[in-house]
Image (cartoon, grey):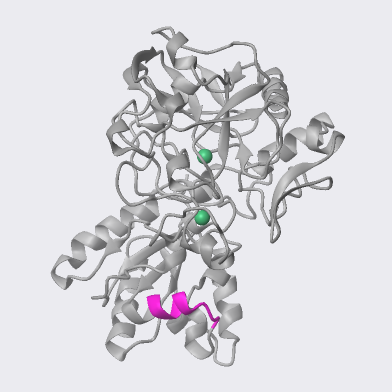
Amino acid sequence: MSVPIPIVFLSYSHDTDAHKEWVLKLATDLMANGVDAELDQWDLVPGQDIVAFMEKGISDSDRVLMICSESYVKKADKGSGGVGYEGLIVTSEVAQNIDTMKFIPLIRNNPSSSKLPRFLGHRLYVDFSNEEQYDTKLQELLRAIHRVKVKPRPGPNPFSTTTAAREDIYTETQSAIYTDPVTGTELVLVKGGCYRMGNVFEADGDGYEDEKPVHEVCVDDFYLGKYEVTVGEFKTFVDEAGYKTEAEKGDGSYIWTDKGWRKDKNANWSNPGFKQDDKHPVVCVSWNDAIAYIEWLSAKTGRKYRLPTEAEWEYAARSGGKDYKYSWGNGTPSGNIADETLKRQFPDWSWPIWEGYESGYIYTAPVGNFMPNEIGIYDMSGNVWEWCQDVYASDAYKKHARNNPIYTGDSASSVIRGGSWYTLPRYVRVFRRGDGARDGRNCYVGFRLAGIK
Ligand SMILES: [Ca+2]
Ligand SMILES: [Ca+2]
């Protein structure tokens, strides 16, 4: 069986002849190593529209190498499409409809502190700054490219909304992955263990009463969705089961508008008040809708899916119960939260944002767009809040069993976790316990599957 050859499109700025020659050499080396490199210097026909050439190159390729020189990053951030060869630069406008996991940034000729265009956030990159390390870096890049699952040709599998494009190339996760044979949904095996649940950073003073007391709990092995459930996955359910969500049956969903939050009777999972494609996390679904999806999928696949308990959710978000404040750890964010990108769009935004951080997304981001946590799970802090199994009570921790705790008391609210694209930094902490009525719908709440091992 022949191995499919990955097609890689090179996007770069024509800074100097030396830079152009370097890119040409890189492309030649890639070709010599089993990669089909597409480059304007080879493939652009005189007189051909450069922007159209790039659009086609991006859509037909398995990966796009963005060679981020200082000038490239400046031009990409300026955001204008550009004329002439500047049309080959990927701006946030160009990237908007593309899964940005497709991009592999390379650093070359960039002494500035802005290594990457803002819309790529804090993506890892391959650093070609040091010429002496060229061979090592080339090998690193080749490993990244060849690890890509090459698209089946002709055309992608219309039933797959997962795998190929958003597989993270930089993280070799140790976790076992379970792929649902019917939907292609991926779940990560989370090895159980004991940890101190609750706000272990209480001394920082940004916590809440319901995050106390910190108490030791243990969870068994379980599976947890690698990504939030997507619009595409939910659509399959709606189409097959003829399901109507509570928003559609009732009076719609809460959405964000220029005038603030309001309930819109026409808002629902397919119309959340902002643009989403199939890879975005589904929102405007109630806890009851999430359960309906899970029951449908369990019946269809013969596998018992469920929502995670909040003890499982927090354990996984903290990469196996580590003392982390966010799913990315304790440092600079890698996720979609309320940040400078949001503030720029809504200058009157009155809640705190994460200052100095650009996620590149105002509303939801496609799932799997940022770095996963240490156990290979994406978007646990931010993007959308996620429904958990537990009923919410502010004093639930006082009633927790040590092993596999779940609170099932009498209340109409369930727990949501992780914060979202709109929530202030304190709310994306992994200890933060949100709550929502089980029939409530909001444009910032979705869910993630869990499963029994
Ligand atoms: Ca954001
Ligand atoms: Ca999330």
- Image quadrant of residue 444? top right
Q: Residue at x 56, y 33 (%)?
A: 386
Q: Is residue 410 visible?
A: yes
Identify the residue at the far bottom of this view. 47
Please indicate whether residue 363 sits to the left or right of residue 379 in the image. right
Q: Nearer the viewer, residue 170 or 145?
A: 170
How many marks do you count on the picture?
0
- The picture places residue 80, in percent across and down from the top left corner, at 54, 81
Q: Is the residue 270 above or below the residue 177 in the image?
A: below
- The picture places residue 268, in percent across and down from the top left corner, at 77, 43
Identify the residue at the far left of this view. 132
Q: Nearer the viewer, residue 346 or 418?
A: 346
The rendered magenta stretch, by its main secondary structure, is classed as: helix
Q: Is the residue 437 above or below the residue 418 in the image?
A: above
Q: Is residue 245 visible?
A: no
Please indicate whether residue 205 sits to the left or right of residue 347 in the image. left
Q: Residue at x 61, y 79 (%)?
A: 52
Magenta-span inclusion, residue 426: no
Please indicate whether residue 97 sits to the left or right of residue 113 in the image. right
- The picture places residue 218, in percent across and down from the top left corner, at 37, 13
Q: Residue at x 58, y 11 (%)?
A: 408
Q: Nearer the viewer, residue 165 or 46?
A: 165
- Image quadrant of residue 111? bottom left
- The picture places residue 452, in percent across and down from the top left corner, at 52, 15
Bounds of the magenta span?
A: 73-81
Q: Nearer the viewer, residue 1 or 79?
A: 79
